[in-house]
Image (spheres, rainbow, N blue to C red):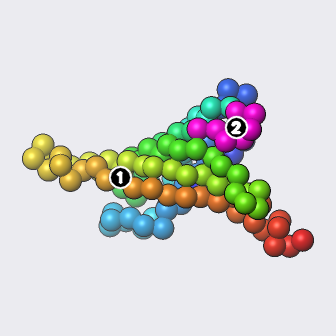
Amino acid sequence: MQIFKVDSQGNFSGTYHTAVSSAQKPIEPCPLVGTQHLDEDGQCTFGFTVNWKKFSDSTAVFMGQCFAGKGGEDILHTSWLLREKVDSLPDDWKATRTGRNVFIRVGQMEERESS
């Protein structure tokens, strides 16, 4: 996941490159858009949506909070919902999945390892 600059209102955009998919097409990076609660201590809450339109008929929403790790790195704890398109209402029960992910800012880890 790559998040670009957050604006003064807490809005941001970026790209998400997943490693997993049940789609038959090759995985490609997809756009994400989101917003965060601007917080002085850096432990903001946030949410973002990923549109998997480049290879799948699904959309995912992530929500969570940013924490500072023991080494000072930014850690995002998220919960997500993934909605896949289904052909009929009886199949609706299997169209939504849920899960959790933890993200650690890579740039901070690389800086620490090189010093």
Q: Quadrant of the C terminus?
A: bottom right
Q: Is residue 71 magenta?
A: no
Badge 2 marks a residue whose secondary structure is loop
Which region shows up in magenta? 39-45
Amino acid bearing label 1:
Thr
Q: Nearer the viewer, residue 79 or 68?
A: 68
Residue furthest out toward the bottom: 114
The residue that appears at 50% across and 58% down in the rendered structure is: 101
- Name the residue that disc number 2 marks: 6
Q: Where does label 1 land, which residue?
A: 98
Query: What amino acid type is highlighted by mark number 2?
Result: Val
- Viewer-closest of 12 and 81: 81
Q: Is residue 81 something that shows in the picture? A: yes
SS label for mark 1: strand
Quadrant location of the N terminus in the rendered image:
bottom right
User: Does the magenta portion include 44?
Assistant: yes
Q: CA distance from mark 1 to mark 2?
A: 26 Å
In the displayed structure, does residue 53 sit left or right of residue 12? Answer: left
| Residue 48: image location, x then y, percent | 52, 41
Residue found at x 76% / y 62%: 71
Find out whether the residues at labels 1 and 2 contact each other: C-beta distance under 8 Å.
no
What residue occupies the far left of the structure in this picture?
A: 90
For image coordinates 53% across by 44% down, the residue present is 64
Name of the residue lying farthest toward the front: 70
Crowd band around label 2 with a 10 angstrom C-alpha radius: few (<14), some (14–19), many (20+): some
Dividing the picture into quadrants, the one containing residue 107 is bottom right
